[in-house]
Structures are given as structure tokens and as C-alpha cells.
Amino acid sequence: MDKKSFNVLEFDKIIELLKDKASSSLGIEMIKKLEPSGDYEEVKYRLQETTEAQSILIKRGSVSMGGIHDIEDKVKRADIGASLDPGSLIMIADTIRAARILSNSLSGDGEEEDFNYPIIQSLATSLYTYRDIEDAIYNAIISELEISDNASPTLRDIRRRIVQKNQSIRSKLNSIISSATYQKYLQDAIISMRGDRFVVPVKAEYRSVVSGIVHDQSSSGATLFIEPMSIVEMNNELRKLKLDEQEEIERILAELSKMVGEVARELISNQEILKKIDFAFAKGKLSIDMRGIDPKLNEDRKFVIKNGRHPLLDRKTVVANTIYLGDEFDTLVITGPNTGGKTVTIKTVGLFALMTQSGLHIPADYGSSMCVYDNIFADIGDEQSIEQSLSTFSSHMTRIVSILKDVTENSLVIFDELGAGTDPVEGAALAIAILEDIKMAGAKCIATTHYSELKNYALTKDRVENAAVEFDINTLSPTYKLLIGVPGKSNAFEISRKLGLSDYIIDRAKEFIDTDNIELEDVLQNVEKNRLKAQEDREEAEKLRAEIEELKKEHQEKLEKLTNQREKMLERARSEAFSITRQAKEEVDSIIKELRRLETQRASKEKNMQIEQLRKELTDSMGSLQPTVKSMIVPKVASKEIKSLKPGDEVRVITLNQEGTVVSADNRKKEAVVQIGIMKMTLPFKSLQKAKGNTHSTVTKKTRSVIKSKSGRVKSEVDLRGMNLEEATLEVEKYLDDATVAGLEQVTIIHGIGTGVLKAGIQEVLKRNRHVKKKRPGGYGEGGVGVTIVTLK
């Protein structure tokens, strides 16, 4: 990449903004080395990394990056056997802790389902975590200057003895300074320290009276600081303890350093990963700060910047512009008055290209698209060199010559005031020739100029387009809006008139220029304004249409939801009413049965007809409340559909898991009326299965009444406790017969624990019984080993 272009496009200022977003020196180190890439896949990866970091920051608000330090040198020292100081070990522990937290929070383990950030997650899962080393360092070291008593039992014991020895010495000295004998010899009744030895202040004239070692004297010489002989040995012991303490501290630091050295390679690997994570989130923070978007990357050597804002200008006042190049035209010539925003516009384009290829988001609207150039050249501003005695024109030409030498078809070239600084006629001719050379090389180019010849060149040449920066004549100020497709006007006449220049002078000036050019520019400018207005109206209409479609979709979803809820509520109400009515009908049937039994001899034909009429009315009332067939059978169908049925066939209703008898069948419509207990239901063949082993069974009216009475009275359990084995055997066999007739699938045999005789005998009975499919001991909450759970065939 052309490094000179970085400076003129102010890419270095973007780097400074990015540095402010880094959380550690590691991230700043990587940012300093950041340069745009010309590789498409590399740029794509960089942008995706930024997008993932931005998304995580938006989703979580922040990511903990605290505690990351540059520990590479310290770890390498530990690797070769050096003993690290407490401050270095604390920095290493902080960094290990930061790596562990980031690994846990960014790896995605146990996160919400939509946490899918492959690049960031890959980095996070690559981090090594060493909780044991982290805890060992934090447990042993309190600060850079203090080792904890918990570092080792030996250190704790030494420090306890030091405290005790201190107390003994002070107690001894207190007895000396408080005694009447010594008080007249002392300057003050205080205990002092010289070095690490306890001393007392003695008047100089009593030196021979107080035996001891002189350690110091006052500046006047009137006071001597003497260590009494009675505590010299105690001070020696205290000194020895302190040496032991320092030795133990050094041993602890050496041990911790050794632990760090053993994982030196892994910690250095962590260092590189943490550097990348910090760098990625710095890019994400900058994107959020400048309201950036991830531009769609293309390989067609074209870009579309929608409402792009220069990232170094105040976003509250900066004017957004839409700029595009490479689709309908390859060269864009921008004209217009000075201070109109031409230079800012072309700098925005160049800076966006550099940012995109560096993996940074650009402050523009969604829908913007960028490509990857192999080089970005820019010649902007006055680069006059006094040292080289070059004029402005010479300086620019020197730069242009170097650009033309290196330009390729995959390059982007940006010129500001091309051809300026020399004779207008020659300058315009040179400018056209330069643009033609770049166009022939196949490169993309944006240039600003004041020359009318370049406006005409852009009008007549294929794949060259004019553009202008708008100027408000009423306020005599630029609007900074870019109008692509129309050449700019100098507006010199209008500005002069506003400033008070006489009309006759302006009219005379107009006589000296080609009026056709003036009229053409006016027409083109009006056409462009109308086009922009139509485009704005179209975009607004599209926006409104999208809002209407969204509202329509929401309304439709709500309507469908309400309809489904209504159907479910009605179906639930029918089911509940049907259940209540069925229960009432069963009670009435029982009463009728009892009446018939009691009045068999006296019942007249008319009375029986009235009873049957009552039953018919109850059945009809149930029919209107019966749940719909659809609600009962749609969820489940037979794997193999029945081809034909006839009255008397035994079938299983899959949705109800009940067996019934076919009353009538329509093989053409594939429907059958099935009797289940007291209910009759019309069901499709696809919800039925032929019952196994009942192909020729004949069920009489008397048999059905027995089954019905059994199904209502048989319980799901039988209690055998208190019976002997013979009684229990008869009871179980009878119970299993009744339970099978009643259609029970699972029953509980309660035999208790006791001596185990009853339980063992019942197990043998169950093994032989033809109704038993399988059996098992009771589980927790079912009775435990005191019961046996039996599944019937």
C-alpha cells in the first residue's frame, strides 16, 4: 500500500481513535501495526471479526477486558528458572484471570441459543485457563510489597514468632524505661528503633552507667541511642527470625515462579489470543461510537457509499453524501466553489476504502458496498517542499508521476485540484491527459477541479461522469451536498450580484463567455435536482410500503392467533360439557337398569317405551356436545390404513387407545360407526387398527353387560396383606381376570415385605398367569419393594 496516501487521507487519526478504544497495551501494540490489506478473503475475515465484536457489545453492553497485561518478558524469565517479584506474579495472575473470564463468557458454552460468533468463539475457546496458578498467586500475594500469611504454614509460624519476640523485647524495654533507676539516665522514656534494633535514648553523660551497644546519636550529641545488653540476644533472635521470614518469602516466590515457568508456552499463546480479542473489541467499540456499518464486500471493483459521513468530523453537523463509482462510470470529476466540500468528499471515499480494507466499519447507511483495491493513491493538499525548492505545481506533478508509474487496473486514484498551480489552459490539458492515462490503465479515479474543460471532458467521454457540490445562492454558503451527474457552477456572477456588484458589469462579463455553456449547466443542474427529488419521493414511498406490509402481516398473525384461540376454547367447552353429560347419562342408565330389575314383572310396554325415549333424548343432547372427530383423530393415524370393515369386527381407536366393535361400515367413504362402551362414534378408517387375536370373537349382550359392570368396579390395585399364601393366590388370580376384562393395562399388587413368603409365592403365581405381560418391583413413590407393578396383556 502507498504509505504517503495514509497521511493525506488522515488514516493515522483513525488509528489514534482506535487506540483509545483498546483495553490493554497488547491491543494498542496490534493497532499500531494495522495496515489495509489488498487480499479479498483477509478483508472479509477482518470485517466479520469486527461485526461479531460489535454484535456482542450491543447484545451485552460490555465485555470484561480488565486485568490484561503484557507478561511475555516475565513469563520467559520464569521459563529459564528466574524468580519473579510479587508485582510481576500479580500481573501474571491478573492476566490468567482475565483469560479465564473471557473464555467462559465468549466461548458460548451454556449461552443462549442465538450466541453464534465463530471467530470470537474460536479465539475464546483457544485460551488456556489455569485456576490453580491463579488461586495460588492470589492466596500468597496481597500486593506488590506484601506477602500473605496464608502463603505457607512456615511463613505463618515465623511471623507469629516475630510478633511474640517483638512483644517480649518491648515488655523488657518498658520495664527498663519505667524503672526509677534508669529514668534519670534517659533523655525520654520512649522505645526507638535504629536499623532493625530496639534502642532507648540515653543522656550522653551517663554512657558509662548504661551498659549496651551505641547505635546512633542525636545531631547535637546530647543523646545516645543505646541497645541495652539485656536485650541484645533478644534482638539477635528477632533478626534471625526476620532473615528466616525473607528466606521463606523467596522460597514461595521461587515456587510460584516455577509454576508459571511450567506453562510458559501456553501463557505466551494466551498473550497472542488476548491481543487479538482486545483488538477485535476495540474495532467493535469504534464502530458503535461512529455508528458504523459492515459494508457489503464485492469483487466487482466498484463501491456504493450511502449517506457516508466523514469519521473525523462532528457527526452532529457533518453532511452525509451518497457516492458511487465503478458501475456506470469509472472516473468522477467533481467541480464547484472553494470550501464547498469537494475535498472532504474525496477524503471520505479514500478513508472509507482504507478503513474497509483494515477491517473497520464505515459510518454510512446500510446497503453500502465496498470493494478491495490493491493500492489507494491520493494527491491532496499543498505539499510544497521548501527544502527541495519545489513550487506547488512541481510538488503535485512529482507525486502524480510516481502514481502513474505504479497504478494498476485494481487501483483507486484520488486527485484534489488536478492541474492547478499553472497556466489554466495548459493545466486543463495536462489534467485531461492524466485522467485519460489512468482510465486506459483501468483504474478507478475521483478528481476535483475548477477547469471548465474537465466538465466538457466528463460530458463527452464514455464512463466519465460529472459531479458538483451544491451552493445556496440565497445564503451565499455551500450545502455540502454532492450532486452526481451535473457539472458544478462557479456561481461567480450570482455571488458578485449578492455582494453589490453592478448589474451592467455582470452583464458585460457574460458577453465574454459562451452563453451555451451557461444554459447547458443550468439545464443539467435543474434536471439533477428534479432527479434527486424524485429519488427521495420514491425512497419515501418504498419506506411507507414496507411499513404497511409489516402492519398487514402483524394484523394477519393476530387474526389467526385469535381464530385458533377461539376454536380451542370452543372445543374445550364442548369436551367439558360432553364429559358432564356422559357422566349424567351413565347415572341415569344405572337408575333405569335398577328400575327394570325391580319392576321386571310389572313393567308395561308403554313404560319401557318412555324409558327408551328418555335415553334417546340424553343421547341426542350428548351428540351436539361431542368433541369433533377432527380434534380427536387428526393428531394420530394408523401406519397402515384398513381396506375394508364389516359389522362385528373388533378394532382399536388409535387416538383414544381404546378397543371397540364396528356397528356399520361404509367401505366406499372409508368410514365406520364404532361402539366404544356406551359411545358410538363415526371414525375414518385411517384412525382405526384391527384388534389382534379377535377375528372371530362373538360378544353377546350378556357378555357386554358383564364387561361394562367390571370396568366400573375394578380398582387398579389389590391388597393381599394379612392373607395366607393360598388365600392370596385365589384373590390374585380372580383380580387379574377381572382387571383384564375391565381393560386395565397396569395394576399394583400389594403384598408387603414381612417374612418374604407371601411375596415369593405371589411372584411364582404371576410368572404362571396368562394375563401377565411383565412385572417389576415398585419404585420410589409407588410403594417400593412392598408392591409389584404388573403390566397386563
Image (spheres, helix red, strand yellow):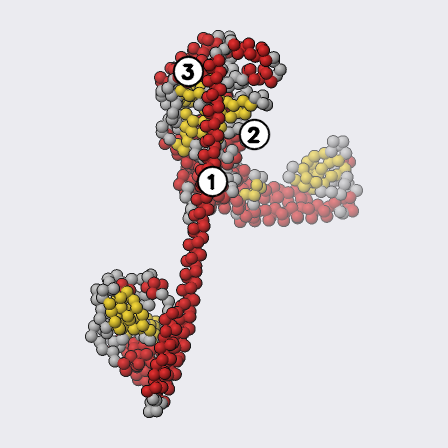
Q: Secondary structure at mark 1?
A: helix
According to the picture, the residue beneath numbered tag 2 turns out to be 317
Residue on which the image places disc 1: 544
**Amino acid, disc 3:** Tyr
Q: Quadrant of the N terminus?
A: top left
- Is residue 74 at least partly visible in the picture? no
- In front here: 195 or 266? 266
Residue 219 visible to an observer of this rendering: yes
Q: Is residue 325 left or right of residue 143?
A: left
Label 3 element class: helix
* Residue that numbered label 3 is attached to: 457
Residue 400 is marked as none
- Up the image or down, 506 lies above or below 340; here it is above
Residue at 39% across, 83% down: 591
Mark 1 crowd level (few <14, some 14–19, many ≥20, 10 Å Cα): few
- The one nearer the camera, 69 or 373, is 373
- Vertical placement of residue 580 versus 464, above or below: below
N-terminal-most mark, 1 or 2: 2
In the image: residue 645, left or right of residue 101: left
Type of the residue with mark 2? Thr
| Disc 1 to disc 2, C-alpha distance | 27 Å
